Amino acid sequence: MRYLSTRGHTDRKQFCEILLEGLAPDGGLYLPESYPQIDAAALTRLRGVWQSQGYADLAFEVLSLYIDDIPASDLQALCRKTYTAEVFGTPEIVPLKPLKAVGQAQPDMYLEALSNGPTLAFKDMAMQLLGNLFEYELARRGEALNIFGATSGDTGSAAEYAMRGKKGVRVFMTSPNGRMSPFQQAQMFSLLDENIHNIAIEGVFDDCQDIVKAVSNDLDFKRKYKIGTVNSINWARLLAQVVYYFAGYFQATQSNEQKVSFTVPSGNFGNVCAGHVARMMGLPIDRLVVATNENDVLDEFFRTGIYRVRGTADTHETSSPSMDISKASNFERFVFDLLERDAAKTKAIFGEGLSTQGFFDLSADARFAQAATTYGFDSGRSTHADRLKTIQQVFASYGLMIDTHTADGVKVAKEHLTPQVPMIVLETALPIKFAATIVEALGRQPDRPPQFEGIEALPKRVQVMAADVDLIKAYITEHCD
Ligand SMILES: *Cc1c(COP(=O)(O)O)cnc(C)c1O
């Protein structure tokens, strides 16, 4: 399997080459040259693997189709080390929870539980594998890597919990001082591992991102200190997410004749892009429903064909903050496929087009209609009032407490139900991470998994610093050998 860039660069790369890279050299995103096809016999075999061997081996089978530069036995060992009941809370790793009231014959829909990993958000599903892949590949090369990033909450903690104690890897994670939820701060800052560095910046999230950009643009510094990232455009992260679409499908169906639909709470389009990849491989997915919050860049595109990025001033701060994006960094991958892999056109609209005009318009392009027809996409939008109502309804009808992002998914899923086609909503976080809104909706505190009892009182390790690139570079220099 070789990987190409969505913007037409002539290089073709292997999996381990792009594992430690971000963007392709021409600014595009990496995609496989073609999607491996799962025919009926292969699907039956994978269902058997899921049923008799479980999630880790299913992951190994799916990943093997895309990774041919890690020996099979090593890849299988990495998957088995990653996806354990100990780390992910249940033997199923991603169990389905039916939304079914007492006395009801068929569930209205299902939640696929992706949030029982170490940081209680679905990003653990991919990041835990990435940590093990990084450690493996760096050891093989005899190299080290310093991950430098910015977080407003979920990504940074998932990265730190995945990389803690890993040989050859250090993490320097900036976050806006005092702006994450108390639970998120406690999660990140209570990590005392030597290779984890929390830097709380006196500023907002955009200041953190600006610093990361400034450091990444200093190519000498970047090379000298082996700076890398783990953001959501990393192909390995996306690939790891493809697996749970298969696991969700096998749990909701008895035979390969059946189809399912997925609704995915979306921000950077990483999670739902993995669903697109699974569907392109031939997994019988009917609809892929993109759910957004008030930051509805993606919903607008699927309704109108116009993709209009927002300025920071137009980006709403919402109660589903992990979906507060102005520009969906993974969206280029889908548009490349939609445009029948026309790299020149992709480059024109995402490169020059977006940076000069701030939008592109495919409404007059005949291929836009195929987003819904050929590729199965639908979309919808949810607001703070919808979230409160949905959290209340789900609690009252099914006795289940859901988080604010999952609530956006359930709200939009209800608008896209089809008889006979099970609807699976991806549960992207647990309610405890966003307690304030749960209290607003239900008048009570969310349940807290026992291992998180009292984490706010643990000792913290965090360096508060001014939003000054030179100071932060000095800090990194001082803490690398
Ligand atoms: C990251 C995140 C999302 C958005 O996922 P994308 O891959 O960026 O679309 C949704 N919900 C939660 C809880 C998240 O942490």
Image (cartoon, rainbow, N blue to C red):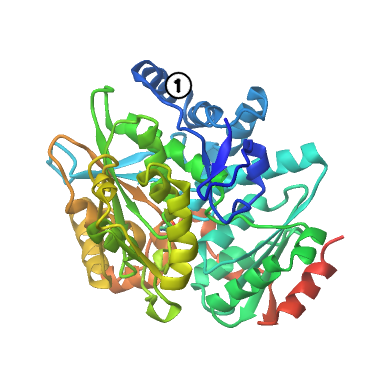
Residue in view at x 36 percent, y 51 percent: 427
Percent across and percent down for residue 379 are: 25, 55
Q: Is residue 250 above or below residue 173?
A: above
Can you say which quadrant of the picture contains the C terminus? bottom right
> In the drawing, does residue 148 fall left or right of residue 333?
right
Q: Is residue 9 above or below residue 197?
A: above
Picture quadrant of residue 437? bottom left
Residue in view at x 67 percent, y 48 percent: 20
| Residue 116 or residue 321, whichever sits in front | 321
Question: For numbered disc 1, what is the local secondary structure?
Answer: helix
Whether residue 66 is visible, yes or no, is: yes
**Disc 1 residue type (three-letter):** Val
Picture quadrant of residue 146? bottom right
What number of labels is visible? 1
Can you say which quadrant of the picture contains the N terminus? top right
Q: Residue furthest top?
A: 41
Q: Which residue is mark 1?
A: 49
Q: Residue furthest right?
A: 481
Residue in view at x 63 percent, y 38 percent: 13
Whether residue 461 is visible, yes or no, is: no
Percent across and percent down for residue 116 are: 46, 48
| Residue 192 or residue 224, whichever sits in front | 224
Q: Is residue 226 above or below residue 175?
A: above
Residue in view at x 34 percent, y 31 percent: 283
The local crowd at label 1, few if under 14, some if 14 to 19, many if 20 or more residues have their Cα within 10 Å, is some
Percent across and percent down for residue 441 are: 27, 70
Write down which quadrant ligand 1 falls in.
bottom left
